[in-house]
Image (cartoon, rainbow, N blue to C red):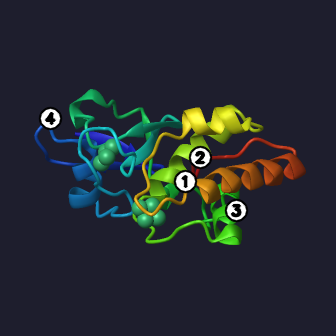
Amino acid sequence: MKLTVNGVQREVDVEGDTPLLWVLREELGLTGTKFGCGIAVCGACTVHIDGVAQRSCALPVSLLQASQKITTIEGLAENADHPVQQAWAELDVPQCGYCQSGMMMAAASLLSQNPSPSEAQIRSHITNICRCGTYPRVLKGVQIASEHLANKGAAPQNEKA
Ligand code: FES
Ligand code: FES
């Protein structure tokens, strides 16, 4: 299969029912995307498909077209300087960190659609689970990233060109 991942065309030789998560991690070595529940609940495996956050653990790779842009945390920004990543670093959002790439991908997707989300919108959009309970800092992180965006006066570019 041909896939476009982080702006690069890749070819993988896998069964069509292989979840995208395992193609990313095992075939392409993109281990920033994590396995948590495997049933599309926890959000640890969140990536972007054409800019929209999706859980990759329950997404058979055969459902994807070569023309669709898959973005992982490794490809979110050229120098890991997406406003969400900057806000996360400023606030020291993670505890153990395991869930955080999924959190950031969900946050980046939200902000690309809605650069100034309300608290309620953040809470309803980001349904990822964090065993360490970083939810208050995640909420604050999204709000700070939103402020950075407002100061820049532009919606975020979520993917490398
Ligand atoms: S590992 Fe995919 S949602 Fe939990
Ligand atoms: S920071 Fe540990 S699971 Fe979220």
- How crowded pointer 1 is (Cα within 10 Å; few <14, some 14-19, many 20+) is rated as many
Q: Which residue is mark 4?
A: 16
Identify which amino acid the numbered label 2 is placed on.
Ala
- How crowded pointer 4 is (Cα within 10 Å; few <14, some 14-19, many 20+) is rated as few
Of residue 8 and residue 41, the one placed in the foreground of this image is 41
Please report whichever mark, 4 or 3, sits nearer to the chain's N-terminal start.
Answer: 4
Q: Position of residue 154 (x, y in %)?
A: 81, 43
Tag in front: 1 or 4:
1
Left or right: residue 107 compared with residue 119? left
Q: Quadrant of residue 80?
A: bottom right
Q: Which residue is mark 1?
A: 104
Q: Which residue is mark 2?
A: 107
The answer to whether the residue labelled 2 contacts the one labelled 1, judged by CB atoms less than 8 Å apart, is yes
Q: Which residue is mark 3?
A: 87
Please report whichever mark, 1 or 4, sits nearer to the chain's N-terminal start.
Answer: 4
Calculate the distance from the C-alpha at mark 3 to the C-alpha at mark 2: 11 Å
Q: Looking at the figure, which quarter contains the N terminus?
A: top left
Please report whichever mark, 2 or 4, sits nearer to the chain's N-terminal start.
Answer: 4
- Helix, strand, or loop for circle 2? helix
Identify which amino acid the numbered label 3 is placed on.
Ala
- The relative height of residue 31 versus residue 9 in the rendered view (above or below) is below
